[in-house]
Amino acid sequence: MTFQNSAMTFQNSADLYARATRVIPGGVNSATRRLARPMAWEWAEGAYMRDVDGNTFLDYHAAFGPIVLGHRHPGVTAAVAEAIEGLDMVGVGVTEREIQLAEKVVEHVPSAEMALAFSTGSEATYMAVRLARGVTGRTKLIKFQGTFHGWHDYLLMNVITPAEKIGQKDPGCAGQLADAVENTLICRFNDLDSVERTIAAHPGEIAAIFLEAIPHNIGCVLPTQAFVEGLRQICDAHGIILVFDEVITGFRHGLGGYQAKLGVTPDLTTMAKAIANGYPCAVIAGRRDLMMQFSTAPGGKVFVGGTYNGHPVGAAAALATIAAMEDGSVHRHLFALGEHARSGIQSIADRLGIRMTVGGYGSVFTPYFMDGPIDRYEDLLRNDNASDVAFRSAMVDQGIFMLPMALKRNHISAAHTLADVERTLDIAETVLKTLR
């Protein structure tokens, strides 16, 4: 059953998509941008965005999370405009904004004694892999079922794994090197015994453990405190580098990242997305002794390069984003609205007798169509994916944009208001009543 708003038409989007498919493979520049119903966009501001047919949507997708302050935030836009007027790109030496960005990361993130800037989260996690291997002389990595760390060969595996492949290697795409797949070991999230067994089976071979601080690529599955503290102890005992992938969680969940909430400090941290409110910027930060092994430092043996690293626009956007967050009001607003959205949707589902567990943290909420508890990816195999997608698609048809894919998280930005969330809950109740 559909909830098509009669005022909405999508012909211009369809026409643009058809045009795109003639020159862009599949018509989109990233695989997860391809939707069952093609959509093309022309405008976004605050908490809203509009497609080329003039349909306006309240945005909870937030471009997979970067939009934390709201689209076209005035402070960020002004900082970017100022950066463009002063300097495009020189590509040698350093600029003051790059220094200021590193200083702010070091000031706020517990694990950060030094920082390097990149353009994307995948670049940052790739460099963490290289650094861990270069420093330890070891080859193998541990990641967890259901976590995502970018598109490169070493970690693109065992994300959305079908039930029949659980416990096996599940590479993310064709073309991955067999050695890369072989050297990446998969453990169960929130299961220290799984980690200890894997390390015991490969003594002295593990260079790093990669933890998505909260596995947001499967919605929002929270790590237990004991699990994260145990990982820190295991890494210390075995000389393994602990990497927190905070590409999504930092700075969305706080200027210190989620590690500040946990009180557990990794050796390296990667961040991107919300650190620059939608502009390309990423960071790898960590212990001084490790960071000084990058070839940007004299004698560093781990090569790092990138023409666009520390780009003036990305650095300016990141500094403006940090500045907007430093008094704490942004995160208080995000957390309050996030809690209201989560409890509101859960209450509606309970009242209607719909099997649902609303996961989330801070500004993130994910309605799962299943009973809890949810401690790891394997639990999500119980999710009613058809109902999940039907709910999201119906919300889109009513002007509430939730990415119409199962298990995906929704994001609140600082531009959302209580009235926005209340309207979302009203529409969600209508949709869920009909779906029921």
Image (cartoon, grey):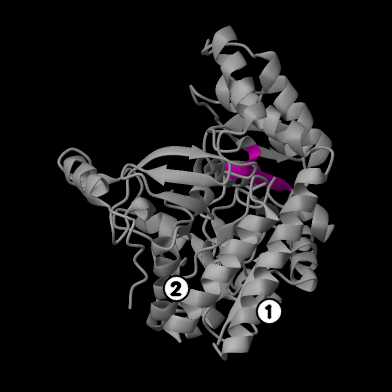
**Mark identifier at residue 325:** none
The quadrant of the rendering that contains the N terminus is bottom left
| Of pointers 1 and 2, the one earlier in the residue sequence | 1
74, above or below 62, in the image: above
Q: Residue at x 55, y 30 (%)?
A: 303
Residue farthest to the front, as pictured: 7
SS of the residue under disc 1: helix
Who is closer to the viewer here, 301 or 280? Answer: 280
Disc 1 residue type (three-letter): Asp
State left or right for residue 15 relative to residue 392: left
Range of residues picked out in magenta = 265-275
**Mark identifier at residue 391:** 2
State left or right for residue 179 relative to residue 342: left
Residue 48, horizontal then vertical, whole percent: 52, 46
SS of the residue under disc 2: helix
| Residue that mark 1 sits on | 193
The image quadrant that residue 156 belongs to is bottom left
Q: Magenta stretch: residue 270 in it?
A: yes
Disc 2 residue type (three-letter): Phe
Q: Residue at x 56, y 60 (%)?
A: 410
Q: Marks 1/2: CA distance?
A: 37 Å
Q: Magenta stretch: residue 225 in it?
A: no
127, above or below 189, in the image: above
Residue 169, horizontal then vertical, whole percent: 42, 70
